[in-house]
Image (cartoon, rainbow, N blue to C red):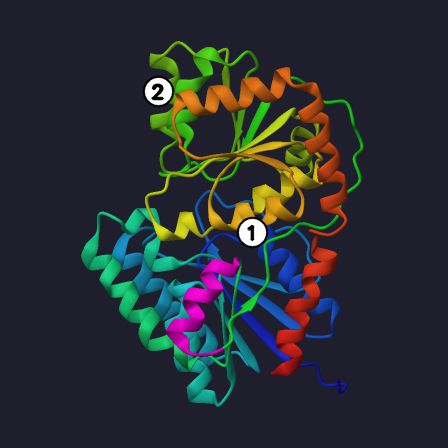
């Protein structure tokens, strides 16, 4: 690489502080010798940006939800890109692909698509056929015109490869390999992640009547108030504890001290069915067994290292049985924990980042 660094601009639509995947991606590219800028948005509740090895920019919008927000944010991205130099523009998900594509073509630069999910098939769009149809058209028009495409699961990579008729690469959402600072497990279950529809949290709460140990929920989201009301109406306040959004170091403490991780999804959309959640790997790094769904990606991972109990159906009865059996079967619990110790040396960002670097070297 010459002394003049290649400039990569990554576009996201969220606040930057909590996006650990983008911190890893941008940090890795920066370490590899690229001049990286991550562009996102600032919200009224946004905290001060954490220090990173790459540049960070947050754009302020007048609207913060709905169509007007998406329209305004895309216009702001267009103008920002117009007045800032980039050699490669990386669109993260479909909601930033339009300004990324047009500015790259206008300036004769490379454009990359990083699909963190299969966007048109998200649960939020299941009951919105017009909105879903719009994003399907965006995907069909723009994704085949990208210089490179990569995504987080092999199943989504296969679907996008068929769509855009190019080899879609796999860069899974794995954390850095971590050492445990506390190996003594406490008797609680942990769910970490967004509190959104389709995450199986309603069934999980309903199951808590018959589960002996409490459930800690770390995260925030659209259905948080509904979940809290569900807990209150069932008098489960002492069994289900909401922790809110936690800083990464505090969340890691809770994760490594948990007895078991929860990674449940409703089979309501292809995006969930083909998912490979980052929490799956976070639980592995903490060396805790987990309850996950018997979906294609988790089947593949569990065949390599058996780290999870996979559910065939998302019902309170099935959840109670799987968790209770694992609590009582110490031999099985120990075996899954040992499998996590083997898996964490393989499923980590130290290994996965090689695929990311190779993509940008080809550009």
Q: Magenta part mainly helix, strand or loop?
A: helix
Other residues around mark 1 within 10 Å, as few (<14) / some (14–19) / many (≥20): few
Q: Quick check: is 159 in the magenta stretch? A: yes
Residue depth check, mark 2 versus mark 1: number of the one nearer the observer: 2
Q: Position of residue 329 (x, y in %)?
A: 65, 19
Q: Where is residue 47 in the image (x, y as percent from the top left)?
A: 55, 45
Residue at 59% across, 33% down:
290
Numbered disc 1: secondary structure: loop
Q: What stretch is highlighted in magenta?
A: 153-166
293 horizontally vs 21: left or right: left
Q: Indicate the quadrant where residue 199 lies.
A: top left
- Tags 2 and 1 in contact by the CB under 8 Å rule? no
In front here: 80 or 231?
Answer: 231
Numbered disc 2: secondary structure: helix
* Label of residue 19 in the image: 1
Q: Where is residue 147 in the image (x, y as percent from the top left)?
A: 50, 81
- Residue sticking out furthest to the left: 130
6 horizontally vs 235: left or right: right
* Label of residue 230 in the image: 2
Other residues around mark 2 within 10 Å, as few (<14) / some (14–19) / many (≥20): some
Q: Earlier in the sequence, mark 2 or mark 1?
A: 1
Query: In the picture shown, does residue 89 fall above or below 1?
Result: above
Residue at 60% across, 36% down:
308
270 horizontally vs 173: left or right: left
Query: In the picture shown, does residue 248 fall above or below 319?
Result: below
Q: Position of residue 206 (x, y in %)?
A: 39, 19
Which quadrant is the N terminus positioned in? bottom right
């Amino acid at each position: 690489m010459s002394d003049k660094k290649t400039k990569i601009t990554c576009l996201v639509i969220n606040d930057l502080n909590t996006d650990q995947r983008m911190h890893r991606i941008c940090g890795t590219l920066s370490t590899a010798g690229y001049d990286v800028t991550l562009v996102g948005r600032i919200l009224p509740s946004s905290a001060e940006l954490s220090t990173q090895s790459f540049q960070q920019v947050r754009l302020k919008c007048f609207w913060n939800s709905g169509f007007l927000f998406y329209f305004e944010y895309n216009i702001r991205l267009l103008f920002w890109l117009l007045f800032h130099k980039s050699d490669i523009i990386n669109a993260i998900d479909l909601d930033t692909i339009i300004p990324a594509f047009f500015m790259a073509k206008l300036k004769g630069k490379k454009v990359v698509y990083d699909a963190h999910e299969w966007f048109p098939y998200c649960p939020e769009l299941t009951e919105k056929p017009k909105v879903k149809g719009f994003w399907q058209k965006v995907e069909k028009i723009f994704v085949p015109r990208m210089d490179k495409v990569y995504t987080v699961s092999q199943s989504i990579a296969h679907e996008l490869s068929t769509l855009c008729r190019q080899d879609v690469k796999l860069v899974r959402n794995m954390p850095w390999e971590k050492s445990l600072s506390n190996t003594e497990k406490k008797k609680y279950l942990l769910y970490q992640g967004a509190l959104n529809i389709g995450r199986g949290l309603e069934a999980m709460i309903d199951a808590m009547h018959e589960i002996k140990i409490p459930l800690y929920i770390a995260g925030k989201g659209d259905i948080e108030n509904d979940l809290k009301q569900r807990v209150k109406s069932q008098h489960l306040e002492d069994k289900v504890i909401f922790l809110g959004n936690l800083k990464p170091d505090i969340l890691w403490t809770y994760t490594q001290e948990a007895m078991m991780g929860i990674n449940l999804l409703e089979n309501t959309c292809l995006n969930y069915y083909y998912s490979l959640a980052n929490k799956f790997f976070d639980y592995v790094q903490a060396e805790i067994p987990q309850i996950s769904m018997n979906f294609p990606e988790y089947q593949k991972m569990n065949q390599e290292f058996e780290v999870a109990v996979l559910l065939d159906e998302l019902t309170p009865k099935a959840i109670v049985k799987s968790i209770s059996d694992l609590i009582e079967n110490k031999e099985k619990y120990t075996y899954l924990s040992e499998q996590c110790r083997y898996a964490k040396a393989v499923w980590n960002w130290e290994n996965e980042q090689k695929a990311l670097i190779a993509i940008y070297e080809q550009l």
